[in-house]
Image (cartoon, rainbow, N blue to C red):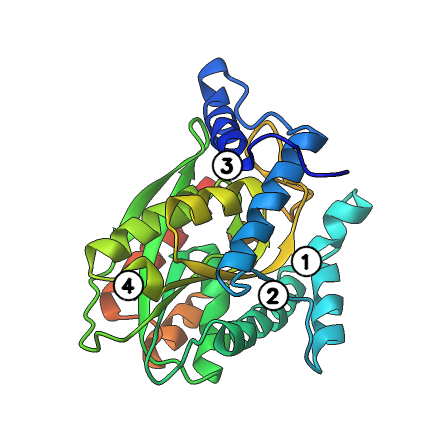
Amino acid sequence: MELLPENHAEALQRLRRVMFGRQEKDEAFHPLTEEELVLLEWAIRRYDSKNGGPLIVCHGDHKDAKGVKRAYYPLRRDYIEGGFPLTSPAEFRAASDIVVDDLLVQAMCQLDIRPERDLICVIWRAGLAFLSAAKRRGFNWFVHLGMARDEKTAKPETYFREKILVTNPEARILICDPMLATGGSLLEAIEVLRGRGFSNGRIRIASVIVAPEGVVRVLQGHPGVRMVVGALDEGLDPNAYIKPGIGDFGDRLCDGLHHSRISEWHTKGMLSYEAALALQQRMDAMARLS
């Protein structure tokens, strides 16, 4: 399908109002038409061309690409094949570790992220998947933000915000959040970081699976932010979930995760004492609800 002949920028602004205004009529994020999805794809490509390719759909141009593609299968197969869960929590964590490691490599190569200079911002709980891979890649500065989605409004609620101490004015920060649906959590995180002195040009994003609606919302809301993603999915369903997606990444990642893992992250410098305590409390609270 050819791109719409009308003024794309004006059409995109109208579409944004439609996408994020439907909630008032209790039908938030109604599946977009083919024409609307084409418009979003145009917006993403336009952002690429203006900024030297900041959005990298990386099933890889490097030697480990086949392994990364294979790792996506256990992440998704419960949803591809249906029925009872086929991927164990341990398998899910192992597969996600391969995928996020690839994203970190791409961020370092394509987005000029340097372990010796830059910080990792982890969005709980799903973003915890990035911790071990980031440490292996040489990162030593970690910042944690705890956010949860309000299921009624599809908006993020922040329940933990770690202090950010940065002495290097050139330092960049990579926000790690595996699932980018509406973009609400990332927009909130960006605002927090901007309030701590990070300009858009110093903010990067790494996400495993994204919806075009959320990508466009983030890129339009904060020009200059750049991102690397693993897979661009079809879009959002009426409940503002990514389709086809992989379910709740945080739930699947943390299912059966032992308390000793939090202690290990703290011991290795990936979690401050304050963050480790808050995370433990959050995990215990989620366990009581399950």
Mark 1 and mark 2 in contact? Answer it, CB < 8 Å.
Answer: yes
- Closer to the chain start, of discs 2 and 4, is 2
Q: Nearer the viewer, mark 2 or mark 4?
A: 2
Decide if residue 43 is on the left or right side of residue 81: left
Decide if residue 70 is on the left or right side of residue 268: right
Q: Nearer the viewer, mark 4 or mark 3?
A: 3
Give the CA distance from mark 2 to mark 4: 22 Å
Amino acid type, label 1? Leu
User: For the point 55% across and 64% down, which residue is it?
Assistant: 53
Residue 240 location (% of width, % of height): 55, 33
Mark 4 and mark 3 in contact? Answer it, CB < 8 Å.
Answer: no
- Closer to the chain start, of discs 1 and 4, is 1
| Label number found at residue 234 | none
The secondary element bearing badge 1 is classed as: helix
Q: Nearer the viewer, mark 1 or mark 4?
A: 1
The residue to which callout 3 is attached is 9
The secondary element bearing badge 3 is classed as: helix
Amino acid type, label 3? Ala
Amino acid type, label 4? Ala
| Label number found at residue 96 | 2
Image quadrant assignment for residue 11? top right
Task: Say if residue 52 shows up in the picture.
Answer: yes
The residue to which callout 4 is attached is 275
